[in-house]
Image (spheres, rainbow, N blue to C red):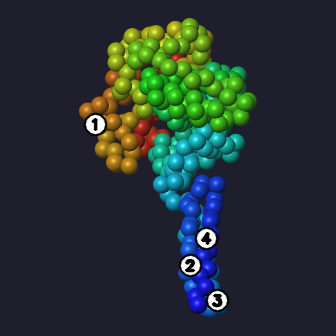
Amino acid sequence: MKYIYIYKIHFKLSKNHCFLIPFSLNTKLFMSKYLLILIFIGFVFILQSCKDTPQFERQAVVLPQIAEDVIDSKPKEKLYGDERSDWQKPQFIINQMGELTGKTIADIGSGALGYFAFKLIGQTSAEKVIAIDVDKEAITTLNQLKSNLSESHQARLEVRLANPNDPKISEKEVDIALIVNTISYIQNRINYFKDLKSKLKDGGSIIIVDFKTKRIPEFVEAPSYNERVYLDIIEEQLYTAGFTSVEVDDTSLEYQYRMTATF
């Protein structure tokens, strides 16, 4: 007579639900100890292979954590999958903005991940940061990321939907308007700058960081050469819009220039 033993073993390997393993074994009345050893070794191998969540799963998990990652009190110049910090040097750009205590900063063209907005919230003492974008989906994502922050950080961050020709900033509302990787998408820039000037508090400034018109490697997500704007054109447009001083730094960053306009 043959006796059948059926084993069904379930594993929940992590909170990310790596996978569920059903295991069935048909055998005689007893199993040899050697077979049991082999089965044990197989389980150990499977557990080890799933110790780390696969890359495609890690990417899905990382997204909601980006907000907290970039506001670390000890700034991380290299996040998971973040090559942008290597060439853009966000901490350098923020440091060049000067003392931000008590100031309001508008991050125009913030993007879905609020790259600079979240850094400004966590790594400076700015009173308020307004993450502004014209894309409704980007605004939705920004609000989702914002919801992961602590209450104190959420209180200092506002997410705002704008129009292509109107950043939706009130008169004399902000101290600094930061425009990063966005200038080529702004149409009728002279009028845009004139309007933005009226949104700045006394002593306020516009800071523009954008791509040089030079050969840029593919790993840098820059607009095509024809879509970039020459530095001197932006400079002249700022003066035409009524700014009285435009400081230009085209050497600190390899692929980008940085401009600060005041009036």
Q: Upstream in the sequence, badge 3 or badge 1?
A: 3
- Looking at the rendered structure, the number of numbered marks drawn on it comes to 4
2 vs 1, front mark: 2
Q: Residues within 10 Å of mark 2 (few under 14, many from 20)?
A: few
Q: Residue 73 lies in what quarter of the image?
A: top right
Q: Residue 239 lies in what quarter of the image?
A: top left
- Residue 179 visible, this orientation: no
204 left or right of 259 in image: right
Nearer-the-camera pick, 178 or 139: 139
Give percent across and percent down for residue 84: 47, 45
Q: Residue at 61%, 85% (x, y): give it.
A: 3
**Which residue bears the numbered disc 3?**
30
**Which residue bears the numbered disc 2?**
25
Q: Residue furthest left?
A: 226
Q: Upstream in the sequence, badge 2 or badge 1?
A: 2
Nearer-the-camera pick, 141 or 69: 141
**Which residue bears the numbered disc 1?**
225
Q: Is residue 92 above or below residue 129?
A: below
Q: Upstream in the sequence, badge 2 or badge 3?
A: 2
Amino acid carrying mark 2 in the image: Leu
**Which residue bears the numbered disc 4?**
8
Give percent across and percent down for residue 69: 62, 44
Q: Residue at 43%, 32% (x, y): give it.
A: 181
181 left or right of 114 in image: left
Q: CA distance from mark 2 to mark 1?
A: 63 Å
Q: Residues within 10 Å of mark 3 (few under 14, many from 20)?
A: few
Q: Upstream in the sequence, badge 1 or badge 4?
A: 4
